Amino acid sequence: MCRKGIVPTRCAMAEVFYLDGEAIPFRAGQNVLEAVLEHRQESSIPYFCFHPAMGSLGACRQCGVMVYPHDGKHPPRLTMACLLPASRDLQLGRAEAKVQHEHQLISELLMRNHPHDCPVCDEGGQCHLQNMTVASGHAYREYEPEKRRYQSQELGPLIRQEMNRCITCYRCVRFYQDLAGGEDFGVFGSRDRVFFGRLEDGPLESPLAGNLAEVCPTGVFTDKVYHQDYLRPWDLEESAGICPHCSIGCNTRPGAARGHLRRVRQRSHGEINPHFLCDRGRYGFRYVAAEDRPRQAQAGGRRQDVDSVLDRLAARLAEGRSAFLGSPREDLDSNLALFALARVLDAPFAAFFEPWEEAKAREILALPHPPAPARISAYAEILVIGAVERVAPTLPLFLREAHDRGAAISLLRCLPSPLTALAGEDRLLPPADLLDAAWEWLGQRHHRPFLLLIDSESVGPELLHLLRREIGTWPDGSGILPVYRQGNLPGASFYAVDGHASRLRTALAGNDYDHLLALGQDPQEMDGLWWRSHGDIDLSLIDHRRSLSWDDVWLSLPCAALSERSGLYYNGEGRLQAAAVAYTPAREERHWRPELGPFPLAAGGALREELLPSPVELCRALAERLELSERWQERLRFYRDFLLRSAPRPGDPGVFLPEELRARFRLHSAPPPRATDQGWSVCRFSHYSEEELANGARELHSLAPASAAWIAPGQQDARQVRLRAVDGTSRTLPLRELPDMAAEVLAIPRAELVFLGLRPGDGVNPEWLD
Amino acid sequence: MSSPTSTAESVPTALLSRLQQVVEHAGSHPEAAVCDLLRILQAEYGWIDDDRLQLVARLCSISPVRVEELCTFYPLVLREDPGRHVLRICDSIACHLAGAPGLLQMAVAQSGVPLGQSNGRYSVLPHVCLGLCERAPAAFVDGKNTVAPLSAEALRQLLQDWERES
Ligand code: SF4
Ligand code: SF4
Ligand code: FES
Ligand code: FES
């Protein structure tokens, strides 16, 4: 049977039923409304409470159809299409007057309390309620008494509530509680006084809360960030985007107009994100509007025009003492362009600055075809290692569905997790013990295919290596799906994970190289300890965010943000997807008397484009100045052709990295095992909003907690903790208690780990301070 | 709303252990004890304040939102201090036809505060069908006694008695 759920199940089309005489095909297990929605883009049956991910409820009574019994004895009867199982040769009527009248009456009933505030409602132009009301023919309000009124709540920076618009379809609470597992949102009251909200004002806690704006069929929940730069939806140009904020690679629909990117909504990909996005994916795009986003080229922290910075950079590259660093969060072509430049100059190149990270990337590339995220729910046994829900916040949707289907979920973790509610086995461990615990789990007898879901930020390459080497001995169909926050790790590192990072470091530490050109990666943010001890290296940066070193480096070149250019990204499955240009940044200006400041387009202003060059354009400019254009282009083409046997276009489902290309990474020997320290160790603390780019999204980032060191309650009375790096520098962090985390573990943010030169699992000697 | 960890102190130990016993009785489904806990606490204090709501959530291992959903669904659970007495007048269909709206109006006039609010001494609340339709209009006094049919005179007298209480 095809079941409801967030992952569509494929079943063979077989039979048909008839709606107003038209044959409608259906699959076993579908209801009539579902089949009609699948068959036609626009449903001829109005509906509200049905949602493909949540199924039917029968709450709104809007989807009535007339059923004509075959027996000829019973009269036709009106019934809800969403509650009527589709069956062969069913005869249904929708167009007849009685049914239409019913639809109209229900609309009228639902509109009875609805405010007439469409002109100021952000849902206007995309409102399901408005569409259905118009379609069902209810136009004039005849109900006299006063409308019911609510006091709406203040729900934080991302979602706005206007409760008076509610039609009680229960979609929001079904999504929030049943699918997202959120605990701070519910439905209160009874009869016609039901309220959907929180216990009290305050930001919604679920990392998936932004979906409320899409599941609510009216304007109760709307996108507060979109509201800041609002235009009617029909004025937006929408494109096919790919979320760059983690390895899942959810498909998005960015909406832009007049030179501004205004919102991101979900675009369904059946294998990746059938219905929903996480809030990092929805609101992270605002990094493009970060106040401190670099827009001016600089030399030694001083503004300079791009051309002279490029001239100086090219001259420096010509000296032959430069190394190159790519970036796993940059798109494929930008990385290849830089790689090709490094190759024609015969210079060292790495995609990672940290050999440890590079070794992990190699293990990730070596994995045999990981399963698609939406396939997680098909597994009957799942082992979750680390804080996967903090890294890829849509994963709990799939895990919850797996759980509802009866999957046995085991959890190995250091930090509190909402997944504990789903886990049959739940172990709190210091990071260094994760490998042994995983090994133990594998030692149990597993007859059915199983899945390992690994937060690769919490573990080392040795864990990935040892586990992936076992895959051959597992039941067929078993696999490993790693998750991490970089949007294009396989694409950036495909050509450069064979010890490239170590060679890059050796080169820079020696006498032959004294300059590093880095794209979208700031070495100080990757390994602060190493970078501090090599202070004589000149750094040039190409990026679209102001990284830690930006204002102090030798040269800095701002480039277009990811959404301002097209790009190709490999997600964690090794699926290559294409993102279209979402928008071209521009400023509205007056045509005349420019001294009076910007003037809206609508009133006769003009748009002045403010597009920065893409990394590929910058590489091309450098190749030209170095008179290496042709060789550079040739190289670039060669790499591209090799990797991209067929390049997907925006909107395509994506193409996979061929297995034989992955296979070459399987030959690597095991990374050295790490000493397991006794006593205190560190793990990475992160908030779901956190990711290098998304950190620049003001509204989203305002929800992240301030930097601190978290420990299990009752372990220490101290108020602060000091940690020392091997070079003698130290960091003092406020100490905070975090219930349900592993004992003798300090959870600290990535920036602090990097500063101290620590990796998750490393032992530390904390100094407790008052 | 007060923090979920500071609530246990507000309840005397004997009462707390009684509540815990009820939860234990629910075995592996502590959430099944929620109605009983609310009933016990309301009998003790007259209503469920935020602290008690948090306590119930913690004892039943469910989120406070879930407890509030239940409290706001059932009209017999009070989330505001009703004063010393509560009068519930049925306003469902039979009682509506038998004059409940008039009684409610009268009660509002006499109490001096809108329905659902306490005048310090008592509260008058509209209520769903009490199952006494054949003797409509029906009322429920202090969560204990029913009065059906409730006459205007009996209503006036009852509220007057409550007002006179010292
Ligand atoms: S708030 Fe929106 S989604 Fe929730 S019940 Fe009301 S109309 Fe439906
Ligand atoms: S951050 Fe990851 S999980 Fe969230 S929308 Fe983007 S790709 Fe999907
Ligand atoms: S969609 Fe069928 S009753 Fe709501
Ligand atoms: S309608 Fe009032 S008791 Fe039933």
Image: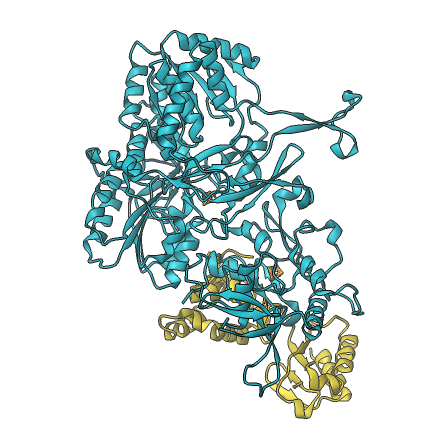
Chain colours: A cyan, B yellow
Q: Can you give x and y, in whole percent of width and height, for residue B111 in the image?
A: 75, 75
Picture residue at 56% right of the left edge, 63% below the top: A36
Tally the numbered discs: 0
Can see residue A583?
yes
* Viewer-proximal residue among A96 and A530: A96
Q: Can you give x and y, in whole percent of width and height, for residue A481 in the image?
A: 33, 46
Q: Which quadrant: the N terminus of chain A?
A: bottom left
Can see residue B53?
no
* Viewer-proximal residue among A661 and A590: A661
* Viewer-proximal residue among A732 and A364: A364
Q: Which quadrant: the C terminus of chain A?
A: top left
**In the shown orientation, is residue A708 left or right of residue A236?**
left
**In the shown orientation, is residue A500 left or right of residue A400?**
left
Q: Is residue A120 above or below residue A87?
A: above
Q: Is residue A503 above or below residue A738?
A: above
Picture residue at 39% right of the left edge, 51% below the top: A417
Q: Is residue B93 above or below residue A242?
A: below
Query: Which quarter of the picture shows residue A585?
Result: top right
Q: Can you give x and y, in whole percent of width and height, for residue A283 in the image?
A: 55, 42
Q: Is residue A611 above or below residue B5?
A: above
**Outermost residue, bottom side:** B134
